[in-house]
Every structure is written in C-alpha cells, then in structure tokens.
C-alpha cells in the first residue's frame, strides 16, 4: 500500500471514529432552591427543542418524547400544542393546558467547525543522521474538519414552577438527531439519579 493510500485510510478512520464520538456533559447545575422531582408513571412531560427549522424541530421533539416515554412518563412533543414559533410564554401556557408535570428542553447553544491536520501514520522517520528521508518534510494527512455541537439540556418541574437541573454537553460529528437526543436523555436521567433528583 503506497503512502497516499495509507494517508487516506488514516483520515477515513479518524473521521469514522469522530462520527462515533459520544455526547458528554462538561457542565451541570442543580437548583439549590428546588426539591427532587416528583414525576410519577403516566405524568405528562413536554419535550421541547426550540429550533427555527420546523421539520428539524418535529424530528427532535418526537425523539425526545420517545425517550421520555421510555421511562414510564408520557412524553408530549411541544409542536403538537404550539405548532408555531416556540416562546417561553407559549410553552408555559401549553404546559398548563395539558396539565404537564414537567418539561425537558434541549437548546442548541453553538455549532462550530474545527479544522485540524494530523500527521499520517504513513509518515516515515529514520534515526540515521545521513538518511535523506530524515531531512524531508513529513507527509501530512488531509485537513480534517470536525463539527462540534453544544447543547444545553434543562429539566423543569411545573409543580415547583422552576428549573431543577441543567447541563451543557458537547458532541463531535453527530449526524443522527435521534441517536444524539436518546444519548443525551440517557445521560440526563443518569445525572438526575446520581444527584438525588429523582426518587
């Protein structure tokens, strides 16, 4: 296999590994004034993903509602109640209308493209002082661009009328909305358990 093919393979592997990167909370917050969540089986919990693209909002909220429902609650996509632009006032009115016990909100805070260059594993180095290859420039792999998505997840308790927990996560090269939201929901549930916010 020549150097070009090796460099291409190394780049492809890096991209594949990047695409499999998991979401990680780098910051979490617990409201010191809030009590533990008292959600019960069957309680309605709104799934809110306030984005401007209506199609993306529907896909994301459906995914989040499924993740909520898989935990014994009744996830309700907010677009079924507020089909137009989602605002704080409209969301609050919708929650009261259906008697929602809580809400989970996922907001995209930032989307950045980070470019980097990595040396190809095919680059050859020698320990010989007289070797001509030791003086040549290494063969860099192709430039790599990673898309970093920063998402804020908020958990509200409507009965307490306040946010109870929040977390900020970063995900690299996530291409599937459903998988990302399911993973964030899993991690959020884990954090709520670890911090004693769910019974």
Image (cartoon, rainbow, N blue to C red):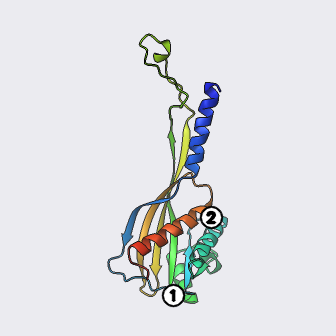
* 54 or 102, nearer to the observer: 102
* 97 or 119, nearer to the observer: 119
Q: Where on the picture, by quarter, is residue 128?
A: top left
The spot of residue 61 in percent (x, y) is 61, 71
Name the residue located 48 percent from the left edge and 72 percent from the top edge: 189
Name the residue located 64 percent from the left edge and 64 percent from the top edge: 56
Name the residue located 49 percent from the left edge and 85 percent from the top edge: 39
The residue that label 2 is drawn on is 178
Labelled disc at residue 40:
1
Please state if 166 lies on the left or on the right of 173 as rendered: left
Instruction: Please identify, in this view, whether the residue under mark 1 or under mark 2 is nearer the observer.
Output: 1
Q: Is residue 186 above or below residue 76?
A: above
Please state if 191 lies on the left or on the right of 171 as rendered: left
The spot of residue 34 in percent (x, y) is 36, 81
The spot of residue 13 in percent (x, y) is 59, 41
Among numbered discs 1 and 2, the one appearing first in the sequence = 1
Name the residue located 51 percent from the left edge and 23 percent from the top edge: 124
* 110 or 141, nearer to the observer: 141
* 176 or 125, nearer to the observer: 125
Q: Is residue 172 above or below residue 128?
A: below
Quarter of the image with the C terminus is bottom left
Q: Secondary structure at mark 1?
A: loop
């Amino acid at each position: 296999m020549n150097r070009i093919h090796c460099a291409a393979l190394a780049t492809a592997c890096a991209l594949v590994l990047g695409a499999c990167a998991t979401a990680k909370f780098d910051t979490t917050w617990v409201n010191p004034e809030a009590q533990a969540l008292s959600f019960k089986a069957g309680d309605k919990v709104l799934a809110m993903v306030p984005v401007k693209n209506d199609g993306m909002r529907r896909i994301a909220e459906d995914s989040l509602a499924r993740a909520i429902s898989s935990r014994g609650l009744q996830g309700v996509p907010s677009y079924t109640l507020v089909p137009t632009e989602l605002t704080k006032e409209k969301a609050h009115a919708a929650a009261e209308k259906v008697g929602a016990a809580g809400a989970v909100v996922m907001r995209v805070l930032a989307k950045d493209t980070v470019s980097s260059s990595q040396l190809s594993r095919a680059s050859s180095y020698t320990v010989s002082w007289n070797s001509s290859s030791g003086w040549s420039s290494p063969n860099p792999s192709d430039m790599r661009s990673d898309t970093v998505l920063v998402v804020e997840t908020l958990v509200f308790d409507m009965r307490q009328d306040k946010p109870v927990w929040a977390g900020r996560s970063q995900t690299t090269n996530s291409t599937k909305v459903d998988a990302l939201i399911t993973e964030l929901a899993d991690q959020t549930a884990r954090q709520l358990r670890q911090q004693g916010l769910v019974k």
